[in-house]
Image (cartoon, rainbow, N blue to C red):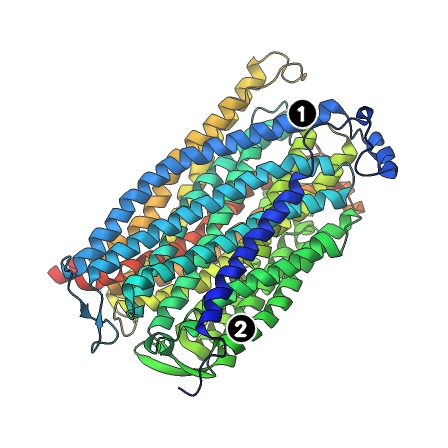
Amino acid sequence: MASAAILPELATQVLIPVAAAVGIAFAVLQWVLVSKVRLTPERRADGGAPKSGPSDYLIEEEEGLNDHNVVVKCAEIQSAISEGATSFLFTEYKYVGLFMGIFAVLIFLFLGSVEGFSTKSQPCHYSKDKTCKPALANAIFSTIAFVLGAVTSLVSGFLGMKIATYANARTTLEARKGVGKAFITAFRSGAVMGFLLAASGLLVLYIAINLFGIYYGDDWEGLFEAITGYGLGGSSMALFGRVGGGIYTKAADVGADLVGKVERNIPEDDPRNPAVIADNVGDNVGDIAGMGSDLFGSYAESSCAALVVASISSFGINHEFTPMVYPLLVSSVGIIACLITTLFATDFFEIKAVDEIEPALKKQLIISTVVMTIGIALVSWLGLPYTFTIFNFGVQKTVQSWQLFLCVAVGLWAGLIIGFVTEYYTSNAYSPVQDVADSCRTGAATNVIFGLALGYKSVIIPIFAIAFSIFLSFSLAAMYGVAVAALGMLSTIATGLAIDAYGPISDNAGGIAEMAGMSHRIRERTDALDAAGNTTAAIGKGFAIGSAALVSLALFGAFVSRAAISTVDVLTPKVFIGLIVGAMLPYWFSAMTMKSVGSAALKMVEEVRRQFNTIPGLMEGTTKPDYATCVKISTDASIKEMIPPGALVMLTPLIVGILFGVETLSGVLAGALVSGVQIAISASNTGGAWDNAKKYIEAGASEHARTLGPKGSDPHKAAVIGDTIGDPLKDTSGPSLNILIKLMAVESLVFAPFFATHGGILFKWL
């Protein structure tokens, strides 16, 4: 080797946990600041002046800020949403916990049987002259890593949901003081989730590597192969969180929209609508808990893919700890970069007007990318030797540290490009969404046609960005380059999740304002926050899908190497059949999830109609609807309906690997990756565009928008139908597809030793 890393091992061992601890401490600080917004009425009569000062007090009086009933109502609604979300997640986690136990046993049995549960050391897979720990050890530690990843994923999703439900009414109350105060509350709450998830994911992975290292010692090949279970655990929980939460939220949303807005012509979050609480609960369990688990899974898998390849490169062979954990160093610097970025939104600049919200969120993406680029350059210079070798399908490829910097940077900047393209196609500030809104003049049919066309077109630039990232990173550093490019895209995960979680929090804040009977002025502010949040949610999904493509390819490369496949030849029949079946799987999966939303929504529509028709005084607002029944319908439907799509994804690699072997499985993975990315991007963007076209008409902010409105007009009704069709596309099928392609790839990698030894039963018989 020409040189060693500048950063000594001891400094690395300190730096990673310290960065994680700083991230957790920052999350706690943001939570403390949010908790200062009181959910109890403050009276001036008790002798103390309001904390906002005498000048603000007059404004507060005008807005009815100290209206006792409004504050109490907000607190009650928040409590109902929080209870509903907690109840659903606990029910979901019971079923998911059972699955986790069964799958953990499968991992142990399959991997342990590779060498017949022998406890003797074996020749290493990649270095036959060396001895490695037995396959039984790999089985035990992979199972432990799987459980660790699964639990971290579940806890991340649960904490995110708790923080979001804690903050939604506080955002509503702050909206009375101005849009800037409400924005800061919503954004800080999102930041709590972003930093908690990024830091806890890093910390648990770091601790697992060090604890597993006590047993594995010099066998880094075995150690990092076992660590891949961490990514599998994270992603398998994310699948159920995304699908279950997505079905829940969309069943409620579609039911509330079709009966409330279209048939009864009442506002979106009107308290008379029986499905309104279920709809607000759904925002938290789908968009917050599901998205949190999803991005955690991506982060865990990209780290695991990079570590597996590094362990059989010069870093692992020569036992160089600092370069070996380069992926964790990138994530550590990412937490610090995102921390600096967050201060720009909450402390350095103040939002004073509605039209400053979206630019402020976009600046977060740009600032975090620029700061992170500097961070990557620093960590590549300090953490890598100048020259080293990377494993490339059986040979060692010589790479220099600046080339690895370029790989991470290209992933980071490709993520920003995907984010901005997604924003262009889903924000109502630009012509694509305005054209979709304009098409509502002639009814729902033209709205649907324009929306679908927009979704298909929005795939073009992100795919070119992903293709360029893959070409450059693979040319420079083989599959390791692709893995760290994915990590680069996810290195600003704390900021990405903050702006993503901000959306559902703002959406809930608007719903609470409507239900609490607050003034039209307050509702306008929360609507503006929500419209920006819709776009940021679409950007978050764009990041998740883009990173999933890179992560899946890196995992695919690691799987092909581990399964000892020299080339994947599509002209071989057994590979081609896998390819064509793999390309079909995202369609099958989408069909299952969309039909699940449809059947759950059908029950919801019938229940909402029943209540409007049979409960006296409901339309007049003199009687309360039965919210609990609607919450129960959504819960029952989502738990029941999430199992078949989840089983499809989890069982496919096992069935194909055991029956048809590793070559056919490699075809399945390639096919699913190629078709899944396209469908995911188009579905998410189509749904986002329809949603914002509806909001464009409702807001009436421009002359063009006013000609299409107001609420209740024929173009508005057509826009609501488009939005309702788009709901399962953007919040259930689209975002779940990126988990499908990642999860099948990481599962195949974990089970690769078993498939390579015992797989392909059918072809052995033929």
Neighbor class of circle 2 (other Cα within 10 Å; few <14, some 14-19, many 20+) is many
Q: Of the residues shown, which amino acid type is indicated by label 1?
A: Lys
22 w.r.t. 246: above or below:
below
538 w.r.t. 560: above or below:
above
Name the residue: 65% across, 48% down: 187
Tell me which corner region of the image, top left, top right, bottom left or bottom right, holds residue 495.
Answer: bottom right
Viewer-nearest residue: 178 or 30: 30
Residue 456: numbered disc: none
Residue 429 left/right relative to 406: right
| Numbered disc 2: secondary structure | helix
Camera-nearest label, 1 or 2: 2
What residue sits right under mark 1 in the picture? 73
Residue 754 left/right relative to 157: left
Name the residue: 39% across, 56% down: 231
Tell me which corner region of the image, top left, top right, bottom left or bottom right, holds residue 37.
Answer: top right
Neighbor class of circle 1 (other Cα within 10 Å; few <14, some 14-19, many 20+) is some
Name the residue: 34% across, 52% down: 146
Counting from the top left corner in percent of width and height, residue 159 is at: 51, 42
Viewer-nearest residue: 262 or 240: 240
Viewer-nearest residue: 255 or 561: 561
Tell me which corner region of the image, top left, top right, bottom left or bottom right, holds residue 599.
Answer: top left
509 w.r.t. 566: above or below:
above
Residue 529 seen: yes
Q: Quadrant of the C terminus?
A: bottom left
What residue sits right under mark 2 in the picture? 379
Q: Of the residues shown, which amino acid type is indicated by label 2?
A: Val
Residue 746 left/right relative to 54: left
Counting from the top left corner in percent of width and height, residue 293 is at: 46, 48
Q: Quadrant of the N terminus?
A: bottom left
